[in-house]
Amino acid sequence: MITATTIEEARKTIKKWKAEGLTVGLVPTMGALHDGHASLVTAAVSDCDRVVTSVFVNPTQFGEGEDLESYPRDFERDCKILEEKGCHMVFHPSVQEMYPDGYGTYVNLESEMTKQLCGRSRPGHFRGVCTVVSKLFNITTPDRAYFGQKDAQQLAVIRRMVKDMDFDIEIVGCPTVREKDGLAKSSRNSYLNDEERQAAAVLYRSIEKAKELAAAGASGTSEASAADPHSIAAADLLKTMTDVVSSEPMARIDYIEAVDGHTLMPKEYLAPGDLVAMAVYIGDTRLIDNFTI
């Protein structure tokens, strides 16, 4: 596996691959890799001739008071995981390499979709995401790029950006990878102590309850579907999830919302493809999760 720390190094190798007619897949990450990241690399390796994984903790997507400095980093371990999964190149630039002195260009999706869900409590976050992902696309020129469904809002925003900016890249969304108790794999899970880790399982329990209710609604057996047997009342799902999460003393809800799966705008009645998403603090750690109707 090649390790490239500069844009010039990465481009030189990728241009050679492209000249040979090879397809390139990109897996953008901030490191601290877990099974969720590994599944993205596995998907990319199965689809593409060459796979590049970026490991870069992007400062522009962190807000004031967020965990930029404490964000987990273990590059040596990350490289071992990537090699085991068949990655061909890890792109590991410095902040100075990505944002040199005088840097002043940013990509901002001026849409209501970036103001919903996480965007409401993390202003500027998606400007940072769109900027760094655009730069990675320009540097690595991938045929396909792989993102996890756990970050559903990020995935939707990137799809919109790719469409708007005419990037000739296929965006591949991959399923959320979970622990045995259902907790979504996340680099931030490492912040949880034993008691908090046990409490965090409440997120997935709330999803399971909501899925049961959604299945009943979709089959036309709940009162929520009386008006339209093919739709599900969002209020019923959100109340169920809120009740379950609130039963855990260590949990503090940031949001639990039901939105259109493409625009991310709130919906009163849900149909297949729509999204139910949440952000919940367990202690000081903010966790996100979601499911699709």
Image: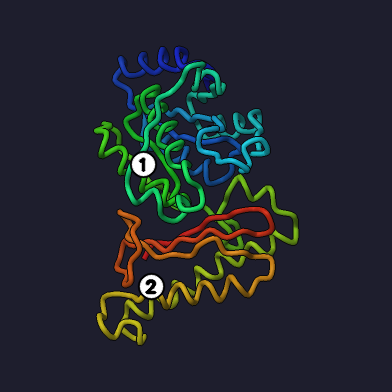
Q: CA distance from mark 1 to mark 2?
A: 25 Å
Relative to 266, residue 210 above or below: below
Question: Is 73 in front, or is 80?
Answer: 73
State the SS at label 1.
helix
- The percent coordinates of residue 165 (x first, y second) are 27, 33
Snapshot quadrant of residue 265 = bottom left
Residue 234's label in the rendered image is: 2
Identity of the amino acid at label 1?
Ile
Snapshot quadrant of residue 286 = bottom right
Snapshot quadrant of residue 11 = top left
Residue drawn at x 35%, y 28% is 142
Relative to 212, residue 87 above or below: above
- Residue 25 visible in this rendered orientation of the protein: no
- The percent coordinates of residue 162 (x first, y second) are 30, 37
Mark 2: few/some/many CA within 10 Å (<14, 14-19, 20+): many
Question: Is 287 in front, or is 80?
Answer: 287
Residue to which mark 1 is pinned: 158
Identity of the amino acid at label 2?
Ala
Q: Is residue 192 left or right of residue 12?
A: right
Q: Is residue 163 left or right of residue 102?
A: left
State the SS at label 2.
helix
- The percent coordinates of residue 40 (x first, y second) are 46, 41
Residue drawn at x 33%, y 27% is 23
Work out whether mark 1 precedes mark 2 in sequence or the reverse, and give the earlier one. 1
Mark 1: few/some/many CA within 10 Å (<14, 14-19, 20+): many
Relative to 217, residue 5 above or below: above
- The percent coordinates of residue 247 (x first, y second) are 63, 75
Question: Is 212 in front, or is 280?
Answer: 280
